[in-house]
Image (cartoon, rainbow, N blue to C red):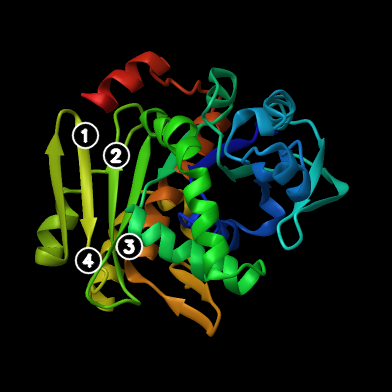
Amino acid sequence: MPRPVILGVVGDSATGKTTITDGLVRVLGEDNVAHIGTDDYHKYDREQRKELGITPLNPECNHMDIMAQDLELLRNGKPILKPIYVHSDGTFTAPEYVEPKPFAIVEGLLGYYTEELRETHDVRVFLSPPEELRRKWKIDRDSSKRGYTEEEVLADLDKREPDSEQFIRPQRRYADLIVTFRPTDDSDVVDAELTLMEGLPHPDLSPLVESAKDDIRVEQRDGESTLWISGGIDEERAREIEEAVWDRMRFAKHLRTEDLGVIETGGGEQHSQSLAILQVLLLYQLVTARATVALGGDDARPEDDEVATSSSS
């Protein structure tokens, strides 16, 4: 059996990591995916962090060595005994036995912080919404699901800001794909940008631009391609774009589903056409990497120094 293909989704708290990864897990099937949250590797529970005055964004607050060791074991097709952190009350519970599966989707704060961690990932995604939007999402999530007041969330954001600046945002330069959601005049709709960095083969997006007119566009700059997708894109047009991407991965057509673009909200489910397009492009990367591994190929990634140089130019 070929080794698992590992997708990393890294970003600050409340950037949309789980929204993106849950959709990918639904499409690939839970039996085919080991879904790992690296928050489980925190060293301290919520009360201990308060006493120590440390935030979970600080590498010193996480078992970085065990995290890297576990991802390497999964990549090599071996099971792990993963710790479990409970976000609802900030404590730990019994560890979970995780078996290797064809795919591993790993989301969290510090997945690209060390070279050892970066090398375990076949595809690296970084989420980078504007800070104003991220703060809104964090207030909405933490006040509805984690028992915080709005004042507590804002105070926590201010406390975490230095660590966000020092430890989280610099990981952007190691990503293959950078996802940026942008607010619109409609509070329930966001535009989406996907920056495709050098280092992985990306699908030719020019036919998508020609067919989609003003609802989607691509900008080329310094070896990067940025795909902008309107949050208000017409459903029929969005499906045409998704179809164009599926045509480029015919060997994975069995994965086709209506589950892409689903957003869980307090009032139920919403559907985002721009999110669905982003997710199908991420699926393209996953199944392409899977095909390469199944054929015995190497990752053929550039060195991290080259990626960092091209990303910062």
Q: Tell me which label, 2 or 3, sits earlier in the chain.
A: 2
Q: Is residue 262 above or below residue 68?
A: below
Q: Quadrant of the N terminus?
A: top right
Comparing labels 3 and 4, the label whose residue is closer to the camera:
4
Whether residue 255 appears in this view of the structure is no
Comparing labels 2 and 3, the label whose residue is closer to the camera:
2
The residue that mark 2 highlights is: 196
Q: Tell me which label, 4 or 2, sits earlier in the chain.
A: 2
Whether residue 185 appears in this view of the structure is yes
Check disc 1: other Cα within 10 Å, few if <14, some if 14-19, many if 20+: some
Q: In which quarter of the image is residue 273?
A: bottom left
The residue that mark 1 highlights is: 224
Task: Kindly indicate whether the residue at mark 2 contacts the one at mark 1 (C-beta within 8 angstroms).
Answer: yes
The residue that mark 4 highlights is: 230
Disc 1 is placed on an element classified as strand
Check disc 2: other Cα within 10 Å, few if <14, some if 14-19, many if 20+: many
Looking at the rendered structure, the kind of residue marked 2 is: Leu
Q: Tell me: 228 left or right of 163.
A: left
Numbered label attached to residue 242:
3
- Furthest residue to the bottom? 267
**How far apart are the two marked residues, 4 and 2, measured between alpha carbons?**
17 Å
Looking at the rendered structure, the kind of residue marked 1 is: Glu
Q: Tell me which label, 4 or 1, sits earlier in the chain.
A: 1
Task: Kindly indicate whether the residue at mark 4 contacts the one at mark 3 (C-beta within 8 angstroms).
Answer: no
